[in-house]
Amino acid sequence: SHAIIIDTDPGQDDAIALLLAAASPELELLGVTTVAGNVPLALTTLNARKVMELAGRRDVPICAGADRPLDVPLVTAEHVHGDTGLNGVELPDPTLAVDSRHAVDFIIQTLREREAGTVTLCPLGPLTNIALALRRAPDIAARIRRIVLMGGGFFEGGNVTPAAEFNIYVDPRAAHEVFNSGVPITMAPLDVTHEALTTAARIEAIRALGNRVGSVVAAWMEFFERFDEEKYGQDGGPLHDPCVIAFLLQPDLFSGRVCNVRIETQSELTRGMTVIDWWGVTGLPANAQVLRHVDSDGFFALLTQRLSALQ
Ligand code: BDR
Ligand code: CA
């Protein structure tokens, strides 16, 4: 079993990751922290509240975090997710309150309270909150069990520039600090998420669950990343962030390699690129487990089955 904190910028795929985690009894969801990314912080926080209410999980604290990257202006992705970040279906205004603690304080406090080596961080957006927590409280690095994140891309290239994936591009400084923190990292880059495609048949199987969550998730999948589908000529869009939660639940769905990963922070051309030493040519020490492939049928079977347990 895993105790986890999900740091997120919902986003339809973030929302589906939250639902998957909320529906999975082997995960102890200690908190949801929000960050500016796909849309500004006020919206990612509102969306996290809506989604946790939809999941029927009023017991999980939701803490708002950084409203901008460490040292560059915020770049958002309304062209992918719609102006609310959760376009595709209208969810009711949440009654669930935001926790009074700042996300960074919540992360630090939780890591210090819990037994060392037991809490996994799951960042699904820019790494700003995680980097701020590590800056403010360097002692937590040794207490984090590991970080399992969605971000980066190598063989697939980038999705916001030819070189960079969105989450890393938005806050490259934060990513650099996290990858150099010494905390064990597993990353699900575009190389793996571009194999997790929301085909028509997979969307229909989720809608056919017949519950409210099934119809909401199907509508989200039909809205977001249609952009990618047209652009990359794929059968369905990539379902990025739920790969992180699926990896915790069923790691054998994934394959990858342990290697050195560096983040480009200087170059204008390749800002936010994850330079993955897949072939071990640098001799630099490994700092991440890089996922490369996913059993996509197994992944969607897991997701669909778990969503059936929600309202
Ligand atoms: C990542 O960027 C966001 O748009 C998605 O939510 C995902 O976390 C994919 O590049
Ligand atoms: Ca995200």
Image (tube, rainbow, N blue to C red):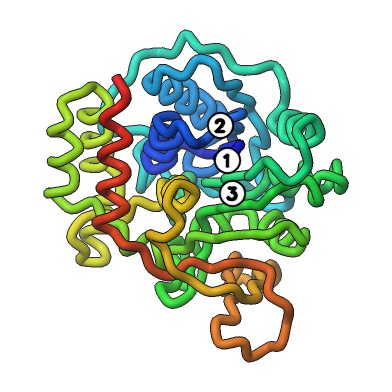
The local secondary structure at tag 1 comes to strand
Q: CA distance from mark 3 to mark 2?
A: 23 Å
**Closer to the camera in the image, 266 or 245:** 245
The local secondary structure at tag 3 comes to loop
Lower position in the chain sequence, tag 3 or tag 1: 1
Amino acid type for the residue under numbered disc 2? Glu
Q: Is residue 46 left or right of residue 297?
A: right
Mark 3 near mark 1, Cβ–Cβ under 8 Å?
Answer: no
Query: Which quadrant is home to the N terminus?
Result: top right
Q: Which mark is residue 74?
A: none
- Give the quarter of the image for residue 56: top left
Mark 1 near mark 2, Cβ–Cβ under 8 Å?
Answer: yes
Q: Is mark 2 within 8 Å of ligand 2?
A: no
Q: Residues within 10 Å of mark 2 (few under 14, many from 20)?
A: some
- Give the quarter of the image for residue 292: bottom left
**Closer to the camera in the image, 243 or 152:** 243
Look at discs 3 and 2 and give the one toward the viewer: 2
Q: Is mark 3 within 8 Å of ligand 2?
A: no
Q: Is residue 300 left or right of residue 70?
A: left
Residue 3 coordinates in the image, percent (x, y)? 61, 36
Residue occupied by mark 3: 126
Residue 73 coordinates in the image, percent (x, y)? 64, 48
Q: CA distance from mark 3 to mark 1?
A: 22 Å
Residue occupied by mark 2: 28
Residue occupied by mark 1: 2
Amino acid type for the residue under numbered disc 1? His
